[in-house]
Image: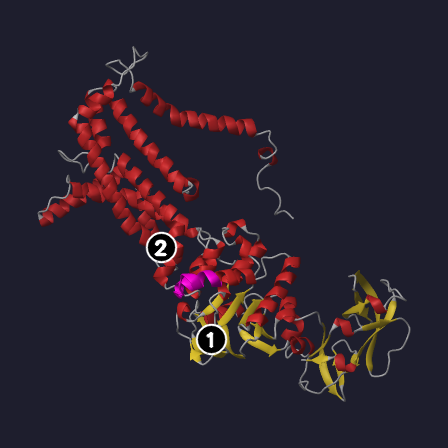
Amino acid sequence: MSSILIQDLVKRHGAQVTVDRVSLEIGQGEFIAFLGPSGCGKTTTLRMIAGLTEASAGSIHFGGREVTHLPPYLRNAGLVFQGYALFPHMSVAENVAFGLQMRKVGHEEERRRVEEALSLVKLAHLAGRLPKELSGGQQQRVALARAIVYKPEVLLLDEPLSALDAKLRTEVRTELRRLQSALGLTTIFVTHDQDEALSVADRIVVMSAGRVEQVGTPREIYQRPATRFVAEFIGLTNLFPGGLEGHGRFRCEDGECFAVTTTDAPSNASVLAIRPEHVRLVRGVPAPDGESAVEATVEDVIYRGALTEFVVRTASGAKLAAHLQNAGLGRYELRPGDRVIASWPADASMLF
Amino acid sequence: MTGSRSPFPRFLSDGSFRPVMVGGCVAAFIMVLSPLAAIIWVSFFENKIISFPPTGYTFDWYRAAAAMPQFRDGFFTSLELGVVATLVSLIVGVPAALVLARGRFPGREAIQSLLLAPLIVPGIVAGAALYMFLIEVELASGVQVAMTFTGLAIAHSLIALPWTVRLVTASLVGLDPQLKEAALTMGAREFTAFRLVTWPLIRPGVVAGALFAFIASFVDLEKSLFLVGPGMTTLPIVIVNYLEWSIDPTIAAVATVQIAIISAGLVLTDRYFKLARAF
């Protein structure tokens, strides 16, 4: 197992820069998620780490060993492709044995380790099958077994769950996390699905337009987004354009004024962001002290089981989303057209 | 969603059009197969001149054909040419297809068109052009190429080449480029990845390309016309020459043997490679 050090990594295609000075330090056994919209450079970065795409500048180290210009077969990385890329002419066991054969481990050990890897992903009983005879979930597990059987220094996963249906996806990601920590594999997981990233990763690297927007734990990324892009990309966010007025107040373009916490906010902040789950809706009761409040009319109510999503419109015409837990909401029901007071604690506001 | 709707008019899919389609297919098959069936049938006629109705049936024409040296020589010349042309088309065509299917480089389209061009240029034109070129070569160097096995082999290699390029490219296009990348990340060097992953997956296409190339060479008439010489004539040209003077069922017997060889080739090809995938 190994740590990964990435310094000022750049990928240029002619004049276009797809990966722009990405630097990152990944600890041994850490589970990192590269998260971003498609085209943000996350897969290109992964391919440069695997050695499948040549880096234009910068360096990559695996545990002190520079690999920047090594061909993929000398890097000792395990890669699970989005489409799995199982060899269709080889059985499950032959697919898994491939990496071991390249390392010439000897017959007895090869057999033992293939068996071990297949039982790790619970597929020992299907060793003789061809990939096309397996379900999508099973193929995904073969791809994983094939990538970990030779004990790679780093495990790279390129959107490995995107081809699975929703229920299987949750199941497999839990399984993946369990395997990863059991084996202590340094892992990079590329995804565009924030739920996936939030639920499996130790740390998330949010990328946009080839750059790293923020690196942090799932909690940090969600609760303290460093940039407006991160706040908008992760979770749902209410945004109010405007400017700071001093004295912990933010004036929106539409004239509303809200109390905000200005510690670690930029003084030239132009956007106020509030997560929908921080917004409270009450009828006719004034907001508690220290809360920002605004009068609004309920426009839309979407019942989601555990919570209800409300869309309200403030007196000045701004739209505001509020997510309320249904467990605490039982007594009064809000309907479209109801006049309410929307409020949130000042320290729930984020400024960019 | 409009995407779920068939782009074809409804009468094509609701069954009412089915008799017309079946009828069309049957008619096409009859049109293609009846001349072949007629030739095979005629080859067993006892009549001295091809005519109906048959007065009886015999194997004599096959014996007669086998006894005629021009048919025997023509057959073996065509066979040797087919083998040589196929080998050349593989040696040139497989690497070319590997580069064409994967690479994105300037001139790619041009090279592809050039390699497939022999399919488009009329055989008689290409044959005449090659003949004139070889004569020029002979005038310049004093080495005779036209009307020799070498000259024919060049022409037949050109006939065979587009087929290997086309079929090998088709099998490569269906191949996921990530398979090779997977092999590389697991520790295989480029050549090992090719040997263990790419090659086994394109082999059916290569086999099919080779068989098609052989058949195309074996049946060629137009390109060879100018290039054959005394003692160096291909079977299709021997057949044409013979037809000029006599019209007995010997010719039907020879054609039947030719049809049998080609059919065997096609059936064999289809076992390795669904031919429908190549077009």
In the displayed structure image, the side of residue B248 where residue A10 appears, left or right? right
Visible in this render: residue B224? no
In the displayed structure image, the side of residue B125 where residue A312 appears, left or right? right
Q: How is the image coloured?
A: secondary structure
Which residue lies at the image location 17% right of the left edge and 43% below the top edge?
Answer: B150
Q: Write down the chain letter for disc 2.
A: B
Vertical order, A300 against A315 (above or below):
above
Q: Number of marks in the image?
A: 2
The amino acid marked with disc number 1 is: Val
Q: Please identify, in this view, whether the residue under mark 1 or under mark 2 is nearer the observer.
A: 2
In the displayed structure image, the side of residue B75 where residue A297 appears, left or right? right
Q: Write down the chain letter for disc 1.
A: A
Furthest residue toward top = B55
Bounds of the magenta span?
Answer: A100-113
On the image, the x and y values in percent for residue B192 come to 36, 60
Per the image, label 2 sits on a secondary structure element best described as helix
- Asked if the magenta segment contains residue A49, the reply would be no
In the displayed structure image, the side of residue B9 where residue A312 appears, left or right? right
Per the image, label 1 sits on a secondary structure element best described as strand
Kindly identify which residue carries mark 1.
Answer: A10
Crowding at dot 1, Cα within 10 Å, few <14 / some 14-19 / many 20+, comes out as many
| Rendered image: mark on residue B98 | 2
Q: CA distance from mark 1 to mark 2?
A: 30 Å
Quarter of the image with the C terminus of chain A is bottom right
| Rendered image: mark on residue A35 | none
